[in-house]
Image (tube, rainbow, N blue to C red):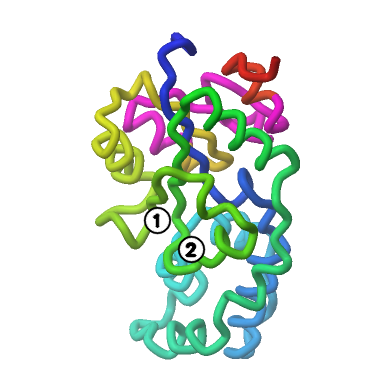
Amino acid sequence: MNISKIKAVVFDCDGVMFDTALANRKFYDEVLQNFDRPSLTDEQFLQVHMMTVTNAVVYLFPEITDHGPVFQCLKQIGYEKFIRYMKIEDGLEGLLDDLASHGFIRAVATNRTDTMGKVLADYSLTDKFDMVVTAADVKKAKPDPEQLEKIMARFSLGPDQVLFIGDSIYDQQAARAAGTVFAAFKKPGLEADIHAMAMQDISRVLQINE
């Protein structure tokens, strides 16, 4: 790993840019409540927290062959009212500004779909990223490497020029499959090239904190 080669820093959303645990739990709990199901168990939460909405629905309702009513319920509930429960990670905005001033490309690779644009807009982050790739923009979401490959193709980057910051096994697998440098955020149990517990750790690794 040669940090001096890094030209782009790619962020996962949930668990990296934002603490979204409360928002996501409230969202899925309301969906389950509409079908007279108990609230998420801790194990269920860990799984759906990484998944696309589609995969989460299949996971939570495995015995149903037609998930249409569940998706209709999700649409009626909407995620917008839960965005206020998201907590932006301390130091994120400063890191994004520092990355820009040092010439780094800034991107997002997330398994969110149609909610990402509003999340960025609501927290005034839209202009702080050069590219945003969601699960809706690719054929296969993470752990497939397609999101990262799409970003690399857009900016003509090699895998060793990309640092991907994630917090789940899906992120780890996507980074390994794409060949990028991987930073595990607040997850010391993941296999990673870099372990970061705060955004300042990323700044130090990239030597942009002077």
- Residue 104, relative to residue 132: is it above or below? above
Q: Residue 48 at what x, y percent from top left?
A: 54, 61
Whether the magenta-drawn stretch holds residue 171 is answered as no
> Residue, x 41% and y 23% (percent of image)?
7
Whether residue 164 is situated above or below residue 141 in the rendered picture: above
* Residue range highlighted in magenta: 172-200
- SS at mark 1? loop
Q: What residue type is labelled 1?
A: Thr
Locate the C terminus by quadrant: top right
| Secondary element type, mark 2 | helix
Check the image and report above or below for 155 versus 203: below
Q: Quadrant of residue 22?
A: bottom right
Residue drawn where x is 62% and y is 64% of the image? 122
- Which kind of residue does numbered mark 2 sit on? Gly
Look at 43% across and 83% down and name the residue there: 71
Residue 177's tag is none
Name the image quarter holding the N terminus: top left
Relative image position of residue 156 (x, y in whole percent): 25, 29
Q: Which one is nearer the viewer's eye here, 150 or 101?
A: 101
Residue holding disc 1: 134
Residue 34 at x, y percent in the picture? 61, 90
What's the mark number on residue 117?
2
Question: Would you say residue 190 sits in the magenta stretch?
Answer: yes
Mark 2 or mark 1: whose residue is earlier in sequence: 2
Seen at 48% across and 45% down, the residue is: 129
Q: Which of marks 2 and 1 is in front?
A: 2
